[in-house]
Amino acid sequence: MSNSVSRILMFPIKGDNRGSLIALEAMSELVPFEIKRCYYIFDTTPGTIRGLHAHRDLKQVLICVSGSCTIVCDNGKERSEFHLDWPDKGVLIEGLVWREMKNFSKGAVLLVLASEHYDEADYIRNNAAFIEEVTHG
Ligand code: TYD
């Protein structure tokens, strides 16, 4: 549990009179892993809560590139909420963290950069099992 981290990231905007651009590179301070996968969540049903799972071995950066949403992270000891409402904000999640994504605005697009390929075996989808694993290893 000690290495479970969730924190807000602020990305530098390269802005000029044409608009704004953010560039993210793998193995950098902002994305401290090789990116093996990216996926995005969009066209969400109003009021829906997604996620509701933890991973054993995955690092992710979540960015709401359009609209807004809330990311809830729980490491078994404390629960943090991050409101993503502009593309220059991200959330870094590392280690055993229960995550939920909610409050999606109309038109929200949540982009996720991930350190590993999709692997259903890495998911803990049962909260009681997560609490057990985070408490007793
Ligand atoms: P799900 O884990 O329910 O999404 P969320 O984390 O938002 O709750 O995934 C929805 C479906 O998409 C499920 O059938 C698994 C599949 N999926 C992939 O095939 N690859 C992926 O990288 C992800 C994240 C999901």
Image (cartoon, helix red, strand yellow):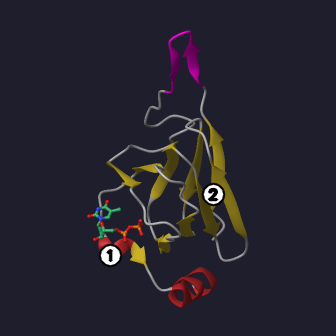
Query: Residue at image x 62%, y 65%?
Result: 72
SS assignment for the magenta stretch, majority? strand
**Relative height, residue 84 to residue 118 (above, below):** above
Q: Is residue 22 visible?
A: yes
Query: Residue at image x 37%, y 72%?
Result: 122
The residue pinned by badge 1 equals 121
Left or right placement of residue 101 versus residue 1 in this view:
left
Where does the magenta region start and end? Answer: 13-22
What kind of element bears circle 1?
Answer: helix
**Relative height, residue 115 to residue 131 (above, below):** above
What kind of element bears circle 2?
Answer: strand
Residue 131 % position (x, y): 59, 85
Left or right placement of residue 37 versus residue 5 in this view:
left
Question: Which amino acid lies under the numbered mark 1 shown in the image of this protein?
Answer: Ala
Question: Which amino acid lies under the numbered mark 2 shown in the image of this protein?
Answer: Ser
- Disc number for residue 6: 2
